[in-house]
Image (tube, rainbow, N blue to C red):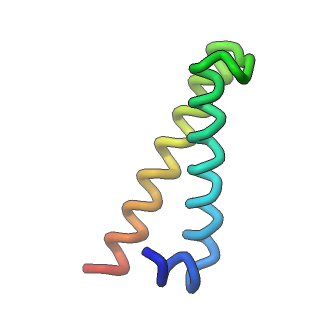
């Protein structure tokens, strides 16, 4: 994964976006970041999409 972070800018950007969303979703669930339910649901979907895309990119490189 470190190699992909260094060599694949799309992977790196998606990875950082996923981490950012993860933190925001956690903050929203803890009540630190006030969000309405629709916004939170949208962020969760985007986070899931990013994770799925990262896994597909990783699998494509390693199979």
Using the image, determine if residue 8 lies above or below residue 55: below
Using the image, determine if residue 18 lies above or below residue 31: below
Q: Quadrant of the C terminus?
A: bottom left
Please state if 54 lies on the left or on the right of 30 as rendered. left
Looking at this rendering, what residue extends furthest in the right direction?
34
Percent of width and height locating residue 20: 65, 47
Using the image, determine if residue 60 lies above or below residue 47: below
| Residue at point 32%, 70% (across, down) | 59
Number of marks:
0
Q: Quadrant of the N terminus?
A: bottom left
The answer to which quarter of the image holds residue 46 is top right
Percent of width and height locating residue 52: 42, 52
| Residue at point 71%, 18% (across, down) | 35
Asked whether 50 or 4 is in front, the reply is 4
Percent of width and height locating residue 7: 56, 85
| Residue at point 57%, 30% (across, down) | 26
Percent of width and height locating residue 44: 54, 32
The answer to which quarter of the image holds residue 61 is bottom left
Looking at this rendering, what residue extends furthest in the left direction?
63
The answer to which quarter of the image holds residue 57 is bottom left
| Residue at point 55%, 76% (across, down) | 5
Please state if 16 lies on the left or on the right of 61 as rendered. right
């Amino acid at each position: 994964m470190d190699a992909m972070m260094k060599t694949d800018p799309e992977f790196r950007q998606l990875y950082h976006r996923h981490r950012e969303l993860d933190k925001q979703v956690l903050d929203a669930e803890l009540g630190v970041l006030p969000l309405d339910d629709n916004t939170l649901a949208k962020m969760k979907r985007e986070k899931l999409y990013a994770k799925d895309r990262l896994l597909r990119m990783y699998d494509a490189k390693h199979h």
